[in-house]
Image (cartoon, grey):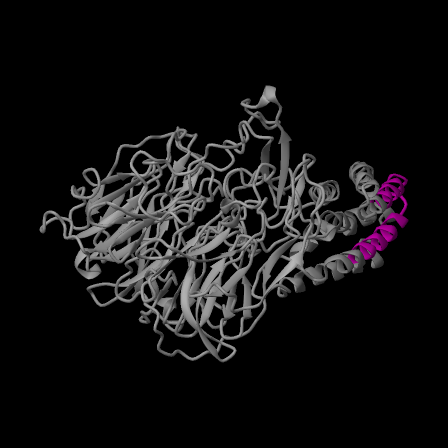
Amino acid sequence: MITKITSVVVALLGIALLLMGGQLLFAGGSPFYALMAIGLLITAFLLFRNKRSALSLYAVLMWITLAWIIWEVGFDKWQWIPRGDLFGVIGLWLALPWTVRALTHNERRFHPFLGTTVAVMILLVAGLSFYDPIPEKGTISNPRVASEAAVAGNDWTAYGGTTNGLRFSSLKQITNQNVKDLEVAWTYHTGDVRQDGDASEYTFEATPLKANGMLYFCTPHNEVHALDPETGAVKWKHVPEKDRSNLQQHQTCRGVSYFDSAAAGAETAPAEPALCRKRIFNATTDAKLVALDADTGKFCADFGNNGVVDLHANMGEVRPHALMQTAAPLVAGNLVIVGGSVMDNGFNSGNPSGVIRAYDAVTGRLVWNFDPATPENTQPIAADKNYPYDTPVAWGTLSADMKNGLVYVPFGNASPDELGIERDANSNTEKFRDALVALDLKTGAFKWRYQSSNHDLWDRDNPSQPSLLDIDYQGNKQPVVVLPTKTGNLFVLNRLTGEPVYPVNQVPVSTEGGVPGEKFAPTQPVSSLNFIPQPLTEKSMWGITPFDQMACRLDFKNLRYDGNPWTPATEKGAIVFPGNIGVFNWGSVAIDPERQLLIASPVRLAYKYTLIKRTPETATARTFTKDGDPYWNENFHGDYAIHIQQLASSLGIPCIAPPWGRMVGVDLKTGKTEWLRRVGTTKNLNTSFLPGRFPIGFPMGMVAHGGPLVTAGDVVFHGATADNFFRVYDSSTGELLWQTELSAGAQATPSSFMGKDGKQYVVIAAGGHGSLGTKAGDSVVAFRLK
């Protein structure tokens, strides 16, 4: 009876495998699964006939499978899973004593050929658990020397530590020798949690500031909280009225900014000397710039209109939720400078301007404005005029070189991001897409630009805050700005001239196909320092079973993919790798300027871009998925709507093999990546194939959405991964030194400061990320040594 049941199961699996394997074969894919299906069907037939030869045949099939696996993917254990798990389980079942006895009529309990084969396979898999081909071991041995860069010390007064955006702390009480003794100092709950009606993109991504003897941060609903840095006790809270709307594209606030009028040498003194000499600025998701007294949390009445500047001013008609702020404003000298964010791909035209505006930090008076459409007009706009629509936006945090009086603006694309049919190639708007732009701090006058993508049709915004320092590249000391990009480039430019310091090549890319009327740039820039993922092949496809892997292989064969990150989107669908989440995003990188080393956490995820033709009849009609959910990227009144989805199996598992998240250490003196490792595990992963969250932490390397912090203690602090863990690594080698599990996802960037108790603290927000599906929460957690 056991052989009959087994034969039926094997036959059913063989039929299913033959159906999908046949489709893959006819699509030009691997013939292995179709051939293996035939082997399974023959095995099932022999089992049904009670032939012991079924065991020998299956042993042969297992050796063929092993040889094929090694030929396709070498000895990467994670890639062995979909190729061998099902066949291994079948082999194990057939090798068990009761199956062997049934087929040998109780003559033996062990089949020498199959039993030995299964034993060898088990030993191989066990051995592979100790081997990982991905990590690259090395050491950054640069000595620590004094740097001229302004860096964070006892306080953390700006989003990136200082206006240089390095995410580096000169504190070194916590070191790679004693970090194992870290403990939780305090935990604070904001009480601001997602409720019905809130945006799905609800994220707690704030980096806390330490200034004025307090800790300051914002919540997704733009509440501002001030805490005692050593205890987490509340000093004050600013809680604005909440406008909950699931039409809001982003409900997040990544940080607030601090201003001290005395330290800045403000030309205008506060109207009331006792009030608002020190200020907290918050740029909100409903496009307001708010100034609060850093001591009390009350509005600074002399700033703008009773403490508020409405950023809708001079924008013309703005559709609901079309204009927002998600990044911390830049405080540089006596100015507070903001860019902005717009609703991507909502409408084909009439999208708010990407103007950069600088306000007097005391009065709120507009000092200068820089709009990409009219870069020469930086004088404050007249009250009765409007900025041009549809210009590139800079939604990330800006940086400033205070010594040389320059502001660095990482412009992105202009909506719609994936269509260029109506663009004017000779316009100023086109020239400033995806461009890092240097402006005069005092006047906003244009100094130089560097374009990180040519004619962007893939949503390749510059999302990261630029980082400023001096490096000794190949023995030549230069002032540089480092720009991480979604494509995976790290452009290292002279920050005074915009000229590349690390070599950049213009590589030929696809220029044909796409949709009618679309044009493509013939080349794209590739920096010598980059983490652009290796091109995909059919062998790159992944899954947890042969069936979802075959589905991914079929997608790979049926979708357009030109083997580079600049594959044109089509109506039939195209693979864009990396996709719009990018290799680098708003978390940016961390740089130790004293050792000239860079720490980054590049991401590897592929996406499917599908253009949906609009007609005059469907110009304003919503488009829906097969499940009845509306697409976000509607592009009303445009030529096409845009459907963007992760390239994943029906189980929700990425089609590309892990690692999806890595951490790297780069020696900036040479431009060489000295070490690379996986980051994050599968624990707490939100899965569609299991109820609840995945309970086991397999160290595959997970997406890390958030940035690292590096310190003079030669350690890297990093949350950001999808498993809710907070970890510390050795900055010289990448070795994992310490970790702890938090109550929610820490999709944020930590900061560090010295408490008045003489102890170094590290603090991180743990509130989860709506789109990534990490566990939600409202915690801010501080750590110190025992």
Residue 59 highlighted magenta (yes or no): yes
Residue 713 visible in the shown view? yes
Magenta range: 37-66
Quarter the C terminus occupies: bottom left
**Who is closer to the viewer here, 353 or 248?**
353
Residue 111, visible in the rendered structure: no
> 30 left or right of 386?
right
Give the image location of residue 171, x and y in percent.
31, 69
**Residue at the top extreme?**
617
Residue in the foreground of this view, choosing between 514 and 236 = 514
| Residue 568 on image: x %, y % | 66, 44
Where, quadrant-wise, is the N terminus in this rendering? top right
| Image-based side of 234 in relation to 481, left or right | left
Q: Is residue 369 above or below residue 507?
A: above
Residue 329, horizontal then vertical, whole percent: 33, 49
Q: Is residue 753 left or right of residue 600?
A: left
> Measured from the top left, where is residue 8 in percent x and y?
81, 36
Q: 493 and 609: which one is in front?
A: 493
Residue at figure coordinates x 9%, y 51% from the top left? 273
Number of marks: 0
Magenta stretch: dominant SS?
Answer: helix
